[in-house]
Amino acid sequence: MKTATADQQGNLLFPELLFAFVAPIGANLESSIEALTKQLKVHDYQVEPIKISDFFDKLKNNIKPQVPLEKSPEHRRYETYIKYGNQLRSDFDRDSILAELAVAEICVRRLKKFRKSVPQK
């Protein structure tokens, strides 16, 4: 399996792929994600899922939700997480803010891997 993602100059060692699954809240994407993961692993790709709503628990410490986030019951989780996502888009005046957070997370993960794969001087 390919583990290093970049050489010492920061050049990618092999192509990276990015897939985004967008679906209505409550839609079960697990079987689609599992099928894609299985196929990508056949070709030696590492799969690192990023779920946007997973950021909310970290974000709420710095950007207080107008409506507290609830994890259960399920319908309350949906309602409060939708409201928080809408609040973030409104607060930042950017409909793309959640996608931008995902891109930032990709950058953070790349840096961590790059530091591990390149010997430090």
Image: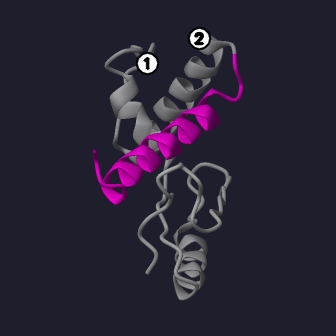
User: Which residue, given by chain and number where applicable, does mark 2 sit on?
Assistant: 91
Is 107 colored magenta in this rendering?
A: yes
Q: Residues within 10 Å of mark 1 (few under 14, many from 20)?
A: few
Instruction: State if disc 1 and disc 2 touch (CB < 8 Å).
Output: no
Disc with the residue nearer the chain's start (2 vs 1) = 1
Point out residue 8 in the picture as x, y percentages from the top left corner: 47, 53
Main SS, magenta region, reads helix
Image quadrant where residue 11 sits = bottom right
Label annotation for residue 99: none
Point out residue 26 in the picture as x, y percentages from the top left corner: 56, 54
State the residue in front, 102 or 88.
102
Point out residue 110 in the picture as x, y percentages from the top left corner: 46, 49
The colour scheme used to paint the residues is one colour
Quick one: SS at disc 2?
helix
Cα gap from disc 2 to disc 1, whole angstroms: 14 Å
Which residue extends farthest bottom? 42
Highlighted magenta segment, given as a residue range: 94-121
Q: Does 4 appear above or below 111?
A: below
Quick one: SS at disc 1?
loop
Is 13 colored magenta in this rendering?
A: no
Q: Does 95 appear above or below 34?
A: above
User: Which residue, given by chain and number where applicable, does mark 1 sit on?
Assistant: 67
Q: Residue at x 43, y 81 (%)?
A: 1
State the residue in front, 68 or 7.
7
